[in-house]
Image (cartoon, grey):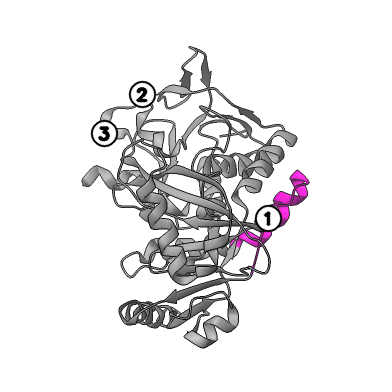
Amino acid sequence: MGKAPKVVIAGAGVIGLTIGWELVQAGCEVVLFDKGTAGRQASWQAGGMLAPAAEIQFEEPDLYRFSRESTELWPEFVKRLEAASGMDVGLRTEGTLVVSDDADSRERLRRVYDFQVEEGLNVRWLTGAEARDQEPFLAPRVTAGVLSPDDIQVDNRRLVLALIEAIRKHGGEVREDAPVAAIEPDERRPRMVLESGEEVAGDVVVLAAGAWSRQIEGLAKEDRPPVRPVKGQMIELKMIRPFELGHVVRGPHGYLVPKPGGRLLLGATSEEMGFDTDVTGGGLYKLLEGAWEIVPGIYDLPVVDTWAGLRPASRDHQPIIGFSSAPGVFMATGHYRHGVMLAPLTARVSADLILGKETSPWPGPFSPLRFKSN
């Protein structure tokens, strides 16, 4: 491409927005379309944890390394975004404390800790007493903990608002209440068809519609990304002194995420319920029980809000990033529980690929083409 391309993006969640922000900085004409209010689906309903060390899984080495590299980009990414938008995104650097509350969970935690050490992570094993020194409101039953001081978090709601502001200030367009009905592939001029009937063409179309990515018509069945919704219920409490948490605290059956302004998030269920977003008694019970077992002081905190979001999970629970076999169509979806954490690196490699630049090997394992042989 001789000049910066025009890029039209289906989906204005954190992935679509960060890709859009990266591209407008490169001089591209960028238009994002969202079926509702931009950033108000999974991105708004997430916990905002940027915790590759706490999230590490034995069977996901590529995803872990991608997560770690992306997290390292976050401080500089935030600095640029806050300067461009004039908004604070609530980056916090206190780290994550993962705890066990019985012999079995302690043994599982020890295995993960040993693996983290083998991977060269900056983690520290704590006794139960040492964990309570870090967070005095931990339950007496907590038997051990692992402190991951390099894990960070962001206020995901402030983040999406800042991205929208930065894109618009730099000449990009974010169109809300503009559902995309179909994508029409073409090597030279792919386009989107909105439910209103309006057609919008570009040099590249980006499919970043999260859990709804497979629902958009126009692509051949075999070209649609194998993405499904996974329901996650959450609770927001209000921290009232003397109760206070400094770290993200993760236990065997839930996590607690302190946010600016005294917000405390409890999360999250993981339910295969299609596009159902009902908040249920059973889901809330599980969240409260899992959090109360490790931090019993939540018992007296007022409930501010409850909600259920839909995470976009691919068939193998790995993100989908890259040009598809449909001409002119780029995909950035399927980030499951890691969309906020993976956003900066996803945006960087996506922009490089769209602009035809030499790129790193990072997106290789996450290509949409991997499903063609499966």
* Residue 87 within the magenta-colored segment of the rendering: yes
Residue 77 drawn at (x, y percent): 65, 55
Q: Earlier in the sequence, mark 2 or mark 1?
A: 1
In the picture of the structure, the residue carrying the numbered disc 1 is: 78
Q: Please, what is the dominant secondary structure of the magenta stretch?
A: helix
Q: Is residue 239 above or below residue 336?
A: below
Gap between marks 3 and 1 measured at Cα: 37 Å
Q: Earlier in the sequence, mark 3 or mark 2?
A: 2
Farthest residue in the top direction?
A: 197
Q: Give the SS element for disc 3.
A: helix
Quadrant of image for the N terminus: top right
Gap between marks 2 and 1 measured at Cα: 35 Å
Q: Give the SS element for disc 1.
A: helix
Q: In the image, what residue occupies the spot 48% across and 79% down? A: 146
Farthest residue in the front direction?
A: 300
Mark 2: give few (<14), some (14-19) or many (20+) Cα within 10 Å. Answer: some
Which amino acid type corresponds to the residue marked 2 in the rendered image?
Glu
In the picture of the structure, the residue carrying the numbered disc 3 is: 222
From where the camera sits, is residue 359 visible?
no
In the picture of the structure, the residue carrying the numbered disc 2 is: 217
Query: Which of the two marks, 3 or 2, is nearer to us in this view?
Result: 2
Q: Is residue 15 above or below residue 106?
A: above
Query: Which of the two marks, 3 or 1, is nearer to us in this view?
Result: 1
Residue 32 drawn at (x, y percent): 57, 30
Gap between marks 3 and 2 measured at Cα: 12 Å
Q: How many marks?
A: 3
Range of magenta residues: 73-93
Q: Which residue is at the front of the view, 57 or 235?
A: 235
